[in-house]
């Protein structure tokens, strides 16, 4: 099989020619520090991993005065409109690149401040400061559409060489695509959790505002030749919230988005970087095609691959499960190979499993990545 066929076969619960092996986002920091700044495509080729092509082309309505700002990378394009005017300003800071995004509407302004280092970015000023701020989002924020033609041009060019993947529209500027995750990024996870006790009606109003936008985007995906789209986020993991909170504030919203994506002909992988074991059946009940990241205890999660396979492996494809902290650094190639075999024995039988680091990584020994990829390619089905 070619890589795209192999990965899709696993995503639909089938048994490919061998264990699919890949990674999540390839971080620019790793490419620069360890591989001389090679491209993402060159990274996959060098290590013999099954490639993933991440894209996210969006479209807007120029006749309504809307324009797309930023470059054409995933999560880096936002819409500015006459009643939702987005401006960006670099702020002075002695250590970190600091950016302020300001949104001007007829009824007031919203702003958020984000900082960056060579690894990643983080929010230091939340966009939602007062509960009434969600009214501005509800009334004025435009919703982008999927640029179906652009997706299909990339899909045709890629052919069977790589899986074509995107996400289900995270809020502008930062974050992951789950509805609860957006709320956590915009208001702060501690604030949202407190509000579920103090003012649950407002939390549901907030989630409904974010949810409508995601639903509109999901419906625009019809005809786009994606292989899978990501939903979810770490703030919905069991290391952050309880199963009861998941039932009340996560599943009712994200399950509808999954249904809308399926109706548009798309597959969905639900991303939970953190604890998952108390939520496995709950996540599967939402109807995704796959779940990730299956973060092991050594990475701060709680996933037992064999137990996850037993409980939900017949319902969803399992993606991830790899401890990149302990087996991409500080061990021997033989130890890395042995861990590949352990993961394959735990979750690979019968197919429906893609071995991947549990989310992205920044530091890693290239020799150990080579051992990881080579041993995985030796894991065949009989």
Image: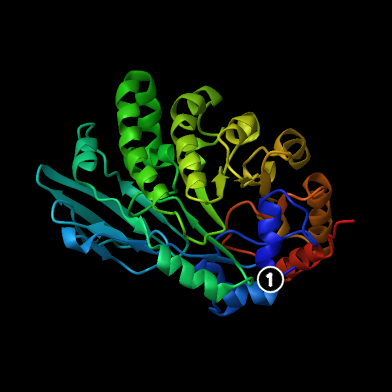
Up-down relation of residue 106 to residue 89 (above or below): above
The one of 356 and 92 positioned closer to us in this rendering: 356
Identify the secondary structure beneath mark 1: helix
> What residue do we see at 40% from left, 64% from top?
57
User: Badge 1, how many Cα within 10 Å: few under 14, some, many 20+?
Assistant: some
- The residue under the point 56% across, 73% down is 158
The answer to which image quadrant residue 115 occupies is: bottom left
Residue 110 or 49: which is nearer the viewer?
A: 49
- 345 on left or right of 299: right
The residue to which callout 1 is attached is 366
Give how far across and how far down residue 359 sits, in percent. Answer: 58, 53
Q: Is residue 170 visible?
A: no
Count of labels in the image? 1
Question: What percent of the width, then of the height, locates residue 182?
Answer: 38, 42
Quadrant assignment, res 82:
bottom left
Q: Is residue 36 above or below residue 86?
A: below
Look at the image and tell me in which quarter the C terminus lies: bottom right
Residue 206 spot, x, y in % from top left: 31, 33
């Amino acid at each position: 099989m070619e890589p795209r066929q192999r990965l899709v076969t696993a995503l639909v619960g089938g048994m490919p020619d061998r264990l699919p092996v890949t990674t999540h986002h390839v971080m620019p920091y790793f490419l620069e520090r360890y591989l001389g700044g090679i491209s993402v495509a060159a990274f996959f080729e060098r290590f013999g991993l099954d490639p993933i092509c991440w894209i996210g082309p969006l479209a807007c309505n120029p006749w309504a005065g809307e324009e797309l700002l930023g470059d054409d990378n995933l999560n880096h394009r936002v819409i500015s409109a006459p009643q939702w005017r987005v401006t960006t300003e670099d702020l002075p800071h002695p250590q970190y690149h600091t950016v302020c995004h300001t949104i001007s509407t007829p009824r007031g302004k919203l702003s958020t401040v984000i900082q960056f280092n060579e690894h990643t970015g983080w929010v230091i000023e939340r966009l939602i400061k007062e509960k009434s701020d969600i009214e501005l989002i509800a009334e004025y924020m435009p919703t982008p559409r999927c640029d179906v033609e652009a997706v299909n041009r990339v899909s045709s060019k890629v052919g069977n060489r790589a899986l074509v993947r995107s996400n289900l529209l995270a809020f502008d500027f930062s974050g992951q695509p789950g509805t609860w995750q957006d709320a956590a990024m915009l208001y702060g996870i501690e604030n949202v959790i407190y509000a579920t006790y103090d003012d649950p009606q407002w939390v549901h109003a907030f989630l409904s505002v974010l949810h409508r936008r995601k639903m509109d985007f999901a419906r625009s995906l019809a005809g786009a030749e994606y292989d899978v789209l990501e939903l979810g986020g770490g703030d919905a993991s069991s290391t952050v919230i309880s199963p009861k909170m998941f039932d009340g504030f996560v599943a009712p919203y994200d399950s509808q988005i999954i249904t809308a994506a399926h109706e548009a002909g798309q597959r969905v992988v639900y991303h939970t970087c953190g604890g998952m074991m108390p939520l496995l059946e709950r996540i599967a009940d939402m109807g995704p095609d796959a779940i990730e990241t299956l973060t092991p205890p050594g990475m701060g999660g709680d996933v037992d691959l064999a137990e996850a396979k037993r409980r939900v492996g017949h319902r969803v494809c399992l993606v991830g499960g790899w401890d990149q902290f302990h087996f991409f650094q500080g061990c021997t190639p033989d130890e890395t190979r042995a861990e590949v075999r352990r993961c394959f024995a735990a979750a690979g039988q019968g197919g429906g499993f893609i071995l991947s680091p549990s989310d992205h990584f920044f530091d890693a020994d290239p020799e150990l990545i080579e051992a990881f990829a080579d041993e995985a390619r030796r894991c065949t089905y009989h």
